[in-house]
Amino acid sequence: MSDIFFPLFNVEVVADASQFAMPRALAMHNACVRHRDFEVIQMLRQKNGALECVIVDVECDEVPPNNPYGIKYRERLALCVSANRSALVEVLALRKNFPVLMHQNSVNFDSPPSLCLYFEPVDSILRTWTPENFLRRIQWWLEKSARGELHPTDQPVEQLFFVTKYELVMPWNYDELKKISGQRFIVAKGQTRKDNGETFFLNPIAQASPTGGIALIDISLSPVIHGHIEREPTKLSELAALLERRGVNLLATLKGQVSLLVGDDGVSEDVDESLTVILLQIPICRSAGTLPEKIVTKAFMLMTGALKLGVKLGALINHNHRYYKDALSVLATSQETWRDEQLFPLEVLRSLDPASARLKSGIVDDGPQGVIVGVGSLGSIMLELWGRSGWGKWTAIDKDHIKPHNLSRHIAFYQHIGTPKTDVVAALHAAVMNGASEIVSVCADATSLNEDTFNILCAAKLVVDASTTLEYPRIASSQAKFGRHMSVFVTPNGNAAVLLAEDESRSIRLRTLEAQYYRAAIHESWGERHLDGNLGSFWSGGSCRDISTVLAYSRIVAHAATLAEQVQLAQSRSEALIRIWFRDPESGNVNAYRVPVHDERHLRFDDLDFFIDDGLEQKLRVQRRQKAPCETGGVLLGYYDFNINAVIVVDALPEPSDSESTTVSFKRGVENLPELVAEASRRTAGIVQYIGEWHSHPPGHSSTPSQDDMYQLDYLSIGMAQDGLPAVSLIIGEHDIQVMKGVVKE
């Protein structure tokens, strides 16, 4: 029959199904015989035994008559069974005018269409595949295609051609680069893979650069309607015919493009390469009369240089080993050899940019103008995660450089030893994004607050402190002009991660969040071993400061992923927060804890700032009410930091059991007190210590100190002076609170 493809070469007719050598082919034949809608027409096999084929006519009752998609009630198909048992049975539509529809496999112009019946991977399909359900799948494909229901209406519009194992990677900003006057492009060839697939790279070059590389010819098409897929052209003449149907004169376009490669003085034939890339820009519309939803770019490789092609097209002439435009000689006439030039399709890919990275990562928010202070192990991983997902525009500040021991848990490589850490993270980000975004490197000590770092920190919307030190977050807390701050760190044993986040208005700073975090660690069950020491230490250099901890990189990576996500979530909210995540290294289980956040209160002495939070004040008031009408009291726990001239109150312990309390006096006892103070210090890695005393005044009285209170302050001052520290005394009255500082004058 003239309207039917003959799909196989070097074949012989199989007279009886029992002659099939492949069990699947026999099973396929028998299933067709049993099915009322399938009629076996013929059986074939290739003489080399690679393929056995059952030719059938199939009828589909659900195919609408005269449907606009061109599917008929009865279709002739070839069910081709491969000797490769891991391959699916291929279904070829043998009618020569069978429509080209979506969800067909890639075939050549002279080959029958191949139906793509499944969405899932082959291994998953074969797990439950049977000849019977395969026949039902064929009918489903024909019926759905005939009704235009094979793809949902909201599915992204399709590409014009099928994908291949050959790829062309375009710059992320190719469309913008094209608009630059005189901008030129070349194609560079990448490494050939084991499957003989290859990746090519489209690179911009300066106008004054020599031609070099593989020539590019860029052609824009008229809009194409979604759902109309073209058969893949294999020859230049086939592509020319295809484009001619869309109003594009490929021959004239090619002539014009190759002529641009040759100046008035001609060009040496040595410049020509052996390949040429034709790039098609294809606007895709969902339906007629609508605007294009996207522009698909498809590329084809010609196995000849652009200048040699120009000669075949009649656009150029080769004279004395130089190429000239046809205007220089009447000998330049078009040859027909261009028609047989072979085409190799290239799947076009775009290099990553922040917008596409966010899309692939499921991130809606562009992210902040951010600064990360400290790009050591934790900071470098978090920054890499944000960079690869396109979240934020980042400046990295760190004074350190890469040393050999850093490579055990840093994103750096051997060649980065001796390089500032900020330069390393910036360079690795550039290697991923290829100029689509950048990380600004500032190799400096953030605590020095020089003019450059100060201005950077003021301009930032978010500053993430990953320095793993106390200096920076405490200094930053005193700077009102800085952007919102968050502090992240992993505990010494690597089992927990902590996030302290200021509120959006910075009314609650890191210094008070740190104190409230310590108070929770002192009293909550999770704090018992939370800040226990590391697994060990080792000398990383000759200095007494060159000590590094023993800690598995896997623990840092696990916590970095959690913290990176949680910083993103915290940044989208306005409130302050304290979060802790515990990870069991044996089971991998992660438990999360939240610590309530309270407003900060700031009192100023002559040369010392005093900080306490509302949560601690409320705790003191509760203890006062519980003991009323008698007075009560206890010790204050906190820490001094003379780098910022501050004393921060963390906690207030209740009265010991041996205390003496009346309605007009209070004498604190000592029962179990040394143990409680020592435990608080242990749970906070030695940071929290005794700083003074607190007591209450009875109901109806203010916090105005009595004469006895002043005597007590003098006594405390003498005791604290032995360590060169001021004494702190806090009095809580009916409605107010008063803090006094005592020092011994020389």
Image (tube, rainbow, N blue to C red):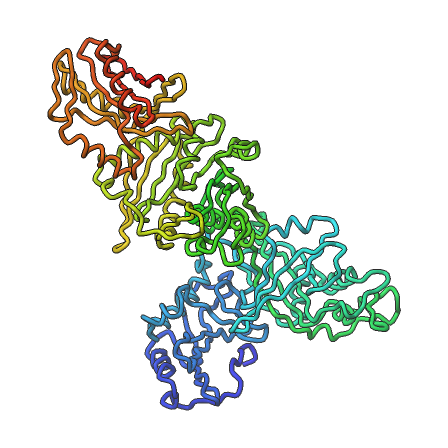
- The structure residue drawn at horizontal position 35% and vertical position 75%, both measured from the top left corner, is 131
Q: Which sits in the foreground, 135 or 441?
A: 441
| Residue at image point 42% right, 56% down | 408
Q: In the rendered image of this protein, does residue 452 appear above or below residue 164? A: above
Residue 326, quarter of picture: bottom right
Identified at 49% across, 48% down, the residue is 387
Q: Is residue 351 above or below residue 517?
A: below
Residue 595 spot, x, y in % from top left: 28, 34
The front one of 638 and 75 is 638
Question: Residue 646, can we see it?
Answer: yes
As drawn, 610 above or below 438: above
480 or 605: nearer the eye? 605
In the rendered view, does 497 fall on the left or right side of 397? left
Tell me where residue 573 appears, x and y as whole percent: 39, 34
State the residue in front, 183 or 517: 517
| 166, above or below 544, in the image | below
**What is the quadrant of residue 489 in the picture?**
top left
Question: Residue 62 at x, y = what percent?
Answer: 40, 64
At horizontal 16% and vertical 16% (from top left) the residue drawn is 666
What percent of the width, then of the height, locates residue 419?
Answer: 54, 51
Residue 287 seen in render: no
**Which quadrant is home to the N terminus?**
bottom right
